[in-house]
Structures are given as structure tokens and as C-alpha cells.
Amino acid sequence: MSRKSERLVNLTIALLATKRYLTKSEIFRTVEGYEGAPEAMERMFERDKDDLRSLGISIELGTFDPIFEDDAGYRITPSSYQLNLGELDGTDIALLSLAATAWSGAALERESTSALIKLASMGIDSDSEALSLLTPQVNVTDQNFALITEAIVRRSEIEFDYLSADLSKQLRKIAPYSMRGQSGSWYLVGLDRERDSLRTFRLDRIISQVSVSKKINTFEIPEPIPNQSGDEATEIALLRVRKNRGHQLRSLATLLESGEEWDEIRLSIVDSAWLLRTILWHRDDVIVLEPPALRERVITSLRDLRELHG
Amino acid sequence: MAKSTTAPLEQTARLLDLVPFLLSHQGISLTDLAKHFKVESDVILDDLNTLWMCGLPGYTPLELIDLAFDSGFVTIRNAAPLAYVRTMSSSEIVALALGLDLLRENSEKLGVEQSNRIEILGKKLRDQLGAQISIIPNSNTAHRSVISKAITERVPVEMTYYSANSDRESKRLVTAYDFFRENDIEYFQGYYHSSRGMRTFRVDRIVAVSLSESIEMIPDFQVRKNESIRVDATLRTLDRASAEAFGLVLTDLRAGGSVTLQAFSPEWLIRSIMAGAGSLVAQSPQEIVLQIRQSIDSTMALYE
């Protein structure tokens, strides 16, 4: 049994039940758990207010008489304390509950458990019969997921160690804008503070715990989030691709000419390292026509490969 | 996961949530209560013993919360001030909003009415956040979860799959084995029943997928999952893309070190080694090295 949680619950009850503001001295006199020297009680009360705030409970400060400001007091208004999702019926509750179960065994499991309890406490019978859905499943177990989403909501900057393309460890300082899931991975998009440009990070390449700044509202998220800057395509590649091959490249390209055995396609070079990998992956199904630099890189890579596997 | 001890703040949150939950679940058993809150029974008992000491200032029996749980079933009275269901934290709202996005991705199973409801609920939640949070799960997440379940439960899936080769969608019965990733694209390996052979499928080309009730059997020789081939190789340069393609533990690698590469399909393995442009060098078995050499030669011939 914890004296502290007992005191916090008693304080919440007292502040919620009161119709008028309770002064500090009234709180110390009447709420169970406040004892000791006045300074000690003061400190205890300050900590308690912070703790309740961290649970999302806002304590309102006000006076009954505007002339006597000394009489400032505290209360919690039921409207700010109470969950308000507007009108919900049984089907809504069932849908929301199903949404929460998506996190079973995943990163936001604790949050979704408490959300489920709140939904079940609303006194609305869940009508799950209408739903013959397959339970959705989020496949992220990364604890950084919860830290980053919280940071996005709070507009707090974050720091982490990231594995770069050459596997070296880099400390990145980011204003996080959004998270998206794609092809089984989660990506964070944010403004890299040091490079002053928008970057994408794959969650499983973050190799430290994300540290979230205590400061909130330190940036604004642009709406809509612009496309990645710095990586604008300036060059165009011309490729010859064997019929019915190279789908990955075709999906990003425009078809220029269709021959009997080969097609000619044209695409913008956004990420040259990725393009080189992909061209090599397709082996003798793809030939680079232009630009000469890319063609040269492919030939050099092939020579290296040949020598290393000689 | 069940926990046996919790921090004071965590307990406070639970106590505040226990009251409205109990008010709407009078007579619930202690075991069920612990299950709902995902904690051990002794944690719930400690919670109830604490809550029993709480109430309005004055703290006489008239003001205290009245709890009865000796029988193993919990009833609560005199708890009006805490009857409100507490507002949700931003993380709780994010969890629900994302879960709804996933539900919507399952749209082929939803009617118009339910899709609309999900839309409206999602908007309500995002309004609560007071911030435009753009967490966009990909449709793959929902499809992937079905495949993943099928792999664990060893049941085939009924799948509508888009084939880029024929530019056509077709229905297939597939027994899935394992996921793998290449160039940031996720695939899975599976036994395609109509053609009686192993095939590779891209997760993002699945149009719809559901668990199948078919009891179609797979020939024995296909069931052995460990049919993957292993290649000893040298990691010449530290290259993240190559390491990730083969699922190597990124933090353990050093340049010049030996690694074992594993794959189901020799063709995929050879292609992936070539994609690394020399960061990975295959050493053995000789037949793979030979095939790589042939692949390089035929590709180089295009440039001569």
C-alpha cells in the first residue's frame, strides 16, 4: 500500500468534489496525508500537483473574490477531468475497443490497456456482434515508438544514435513531425536540427533509447509536411530493361519505347546509392544508357565484383 | 504483461480508473478485474485496500469509498466524486487512432456504415489531441498481420495478389513460410498450391488476404522450413543496405569480418550479393561463387 497514491487520490477527490476553490491551508487541514512542517507540506503539495498534471489532470487556480488575491485556491473541474468523446453508441465502443487490441504485445500496449478500461467504464454496452473483422495487429515492439509519438504530440525535440549507411553511429537531433508504417517498417520524418533539412529515419536503425527534451511546444509542424528537401532529383537516368523484368524500376519510371526484347525507360535519380544497388540487383535484365557517370559506376562495380569473386 | 509491483504514480492512475470501472462492473471477480487491468491479483488487492482508505475530507464511514471484496467479488458504493471516466492521455489517443487506421485498411471486410464511423471516430480522436498527428500506417501492416498469423498457426491464406508480370490480379491459395526484406521491400516465401512450388510474394502487392479454411496438404519435402542455403562470405566494407538485406546484426559487424548469409532462394542471394557492389564477397560453397561469376559476366557483356 502506498501512502503517496492514497494522498494523490484523496487530493483528486477533494478538488473534484468541491464547488468552490480550496485554499492551500484548507487542503493541508482537511486532506488526509498532508502532515509535518508547513514548508514540507508546501513541497509535498507542489510535487503532488506536478504528478497529477503528468497523469493529464489539470488543476485550476482561481479566487472566489477577485479583490483578495491571497485567497487563491485550487480545484479540478469535472469537465476537464472527464473523458469526452461526444456521443458514442455500442458499435463505436466496439470499434474503439477493437482498435485498442491492435497493440497487444506491441509498443503502446500499456496505453491501449488503460484506454480499453476507460472505454469499458463508460457504461455503454459494446456491440461487437456487428463486427466480424479480423483483429488488426500493429507489428512494432520498439519502445522508442511510444517515446517518439509522445514527442510529436508535445512538440518536443528528440535525440538518438542512428546507424548511417556505412554503419557508423551518428547522434541526431530531430524535431519529430510524423511517423508512418511502410512495408513492415516504421519511419520517423523530422527536421534535422543540425543539417536544417527534413530527413527520414527507420525506427530499427535507431540504436539508442530516444531521449525526449523536457521542453514542450518548441516547434511547429508544417501542414502539409513538405517533401524531403536536399534530395531533389536533378538528374535523369535512361535505362534499357528486359521485357517483363525490372518491375521495381518500372514502377518509378516512364516508358519511352517498347521494343521486342527490351523497353526503354526514364526515371529521376533521387537516391543514387539505391539506384546503383537496384540496377546491380537486376543483373543482365537492365542496362544503363545515361547518364555516363552512372553507367561508369555500374561498370566499375561489376569489375570489382568480378575481381573479388575471381 | 502482468506485473506484481507498481510505482505510486502508476498505482494512482489505476486507482482513479478503478472507480468508474467498478461502478459499471459491480460484482466482478477479483481474477477478472486483475485480468482487465493486466496486473497480478495481489496488485489489485493492494489497490482495493488503498482505495478503501480514500474518500472526501472528513474520512468518516460516510465519506469514505465503500468497497466489499471479501467474497472474491467486488462491489463499490459511495464513490460519486470519482465516478467520472478520466480523460485519455495523448498516448492512449494515439494508440486508438492508429488502431482505427488499421481497421480501415481492412476495408474489404467493412461496410460503408462502419467505414464512415471509423472515419468520424478517428477525427474525434485527432481533435482531442489538439494537434495534427500524422501517423499513417501502411495497408501492408494489416495484410502482414494476417500472413504473420498464418505462419504461426500454419494455415494457408486465400490471397488476391497483383502480379506485375501479367498486370493482373488473381486469387491464390498460399502457405506462407517466412518474411524477408530486400531493398526496403518486404517479401514472403510461400508454397503456391496451384503450381505446387515455392514462390516469392511482395507484401505490398497483396490486394486482399484472409486465413483459409482449406485443408490442402503440402508435400512433405516442402514443409521442411530449414531448406535455406547458407553461404560463407566476407564483409569487405560496412554497408548498411547489404547487412540489412541479409538480416545481419548491424551493431556486431566489422569490416573484413566473416559472416554467414542465409536465404531461401539462391537466385535472391546471388542478386543481393551483386547489389552490394563488392561489400559482400562470397567464399563458399563453390557452386554459388561460380554462379555469381556467371551472373557478373553476363551483365558485363551488356556493356561491351
Image: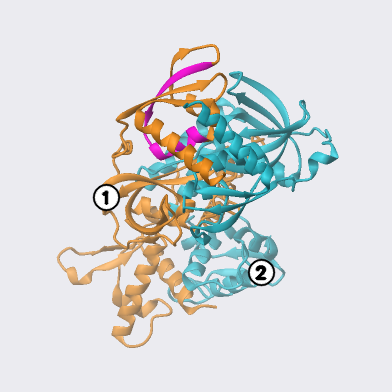
Chain colours: A orange, B cyan
Query: Alpha carbon of mark 2 to alpha carbon of mark 1: how far?
Result: 52 Å
The amino acid on which the numbered mark 1 sits, given as a three-letter code, is: Arg
Task: Tell me the residue that label 1 is attached to.
Answer: A195
Q: Residue at x 55, y 78 (%)?
A: A1
* Extreme residue in the left direction: A67
Residue B132 lies left or right of residue B235; in this view the side is left
Asked whether residue B111 appears in the rendered view, the answer is yes
Q: To which chain does the residue with label 1 belong? A: A
Label 2: few (<14), some or many (≥20) within 10 Å?
some
Q: Quadrant of residue B112?
A: top right
- What is the magenta range? A262-280
Provide the secondary structure element on which disc 2 rests: helix
Residue B109 lies left or right of residue A64; in this view the side is right
Q: Is residue B291 above or below residue B83?
A: above
Asked whether residue B183 appears in the rendered view, the answer is no
Task: Tell me the residue that label 2 is attached to.
Answer: B41
Label 1: few (<14), some or many (≥20) within 10 Å?
few
Provide the secondary structure element on which disc 1 rests: loop
Task: State the image coordinates of residue B168 (x, y, percent, origin top left).
Answer: 61, 18
Instruction: Tell which tag, 2 or 1, sits nearer the viewer.
Output: 1
Q: Which mark is residue A206?
A: none
Q: Residue at x 38, y 77 (%)?
A: A30
Q: Nearer the viewer, residue A22 or B275?
A: B275
Please identify the quadrant where the C terminus of chain A is shown.
Answer: top right
Q: Nearer the viewer, residue A74 or B141?
A: B141
